[in-house]
Amino acid sequence: MGKLNVAIVGLAFGGFFAEIYQNHPDVGRLILFDTDKQREENLCRKMGIADRKKTFEDILKDPDIDAVHLVTPFTLHEEQSIAVLDAGKHCACTVPMGLTLEGIRKIVEAKRRSGKNYMMMETTLYTYQFFYAKQMLETGELGRIQFLRGCHYQDMEKWPDYWLGLPPMYYGTHAISPVTVLAGSRIKRVHCVGSGSMNPEYTKYYGNSFPVESALFEYENGLKAEVTRSLFETAREYVEGFYVYGSRRAFEWGFRDNDDPYVTTLIPPSEDARGGTYETENVELPFYAESLPEGIRQFAVGGCNFNPLSPDKPWFEEMGSAHHGSHPHLVHEFLRSILEERKPFVDEILGANISAAGICAHLSALKGGACVEIPEF
């Protein structure tokens, strides 16, 4: 099949994906765009790319561009995703899908109008850790899933203004996504509470006073998952983790983001004993690069030649080895879903459920933990 012409919009974080697209065998033209023209110039020169556009609108108007990967501030995701789809182009977008339920619904409608693919580029669903836990589930090692937990602790002090005071669950997808996919069911309702107090200067942006939010999600199949997200003034080392507890074994992320996970095995009691015993081991994970085209396998283990945020550092020092190897898998899934004329794994339905669950969780927190139903898309 033919190759795809792809535009990356937003080259700060988006710059980490540029070499992956450039080396992917399914990509023809690669167009790089950023409103910061110096950043754009630096990356284009470094990569030997002359194909550039003056404005975002020029990308939408170019009939030869097949797909657009949006790596822009989340405040722009709704309008830009709709614009890309309405321009007749396939759309990949960083998380979250949107910040309002109405905006998410409009993206779903635009995707259906256009007939093009929409993919929410959720990194945690393509990490080494998720691949390992998913394999444990599919082989029956976990047994029956009994409970799930997700967490994302991060301090956003001195990030751009649109982050300041953000309700934590608005950006909860990294913690919500893995437990939702492992649960194998749609989130249907949520109870959430906010905790702590925050710098009053930050509350003026979103009217949110909670630095931490903890939610209990209920799935249609009856499973439950607890998710905690912090953004400000909370002394906890960074981690985007998930934990799944089965009837036979459990998978738990390490204490720090790059720690090896723990796998616990339940050993049933003998006839003359009460209660089972446990064996726990620290597991070193494989890279899971074999499923990728040979030309981009290096990016699953941190092999990138240019770091757009800190040009003097390797990218894996800045980005945690490509969010645990997820970047090339995201690019590959997006491109192959288009060429194979199928939906991507994280399509508009799954993306909408996960993003809407975070929005509804904050609504619940504002109501003191009252139950909030998640709309269907």
Image: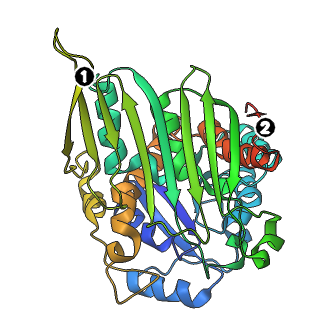
Residue closer to the observer: 119 or 181: 181
In depth, the one of 7 and 331 nearer the eye is 331
Residue 270 in the image, given as x and y percentages of width and height: 16, 13
Here the colouring is rainbow
Q: Quick one: SS at disc 1?
A: loop
Contact (Cβ within 8 Å) of mark 2 with mark 1: no
Q: Which residue is mark 2?
A: 370
The disc labelled 1 sits on which kind of residue?
Answer: Gly
Q: Is 129 left or right of 29, judged from the image as shown?
A: left
Q: Residue at x 60, y 65 (%)?
A: 231
Q: Residue furthest top?
A: 271
Place residue 73 in its image quadrant: bottom right
Q: Which residue is mark 1?
A: 276
Q: Is residue 76 left or right of residue 41?
A: right
Q: Which quarter of the rendered picture does the C terminus lie within?
A: top right
Please tell me whether residue 133 is drawn above or below residue 293 in the rendered image: above
Q: Amino acid at mark 2?
A: Ala
Disc 2/disc 1 C-alpha distance (Å): 37 Å
Residue 40: % across, % down = 54, 83
The N terminus - image quarter: top left
Give percent across and percent down for residue 303: 27, 69
Q: Is residue 93 visible?
A: no
Mark 2 crowdedness (10 Å alpha carbons): few <14, some 14-19, many ≥20: some
Q: 345 or 319, which lies in front?
A: 319
374 left or right of 126? right
> Residue 330: horizontal and vertical position, in percent?
44, 52
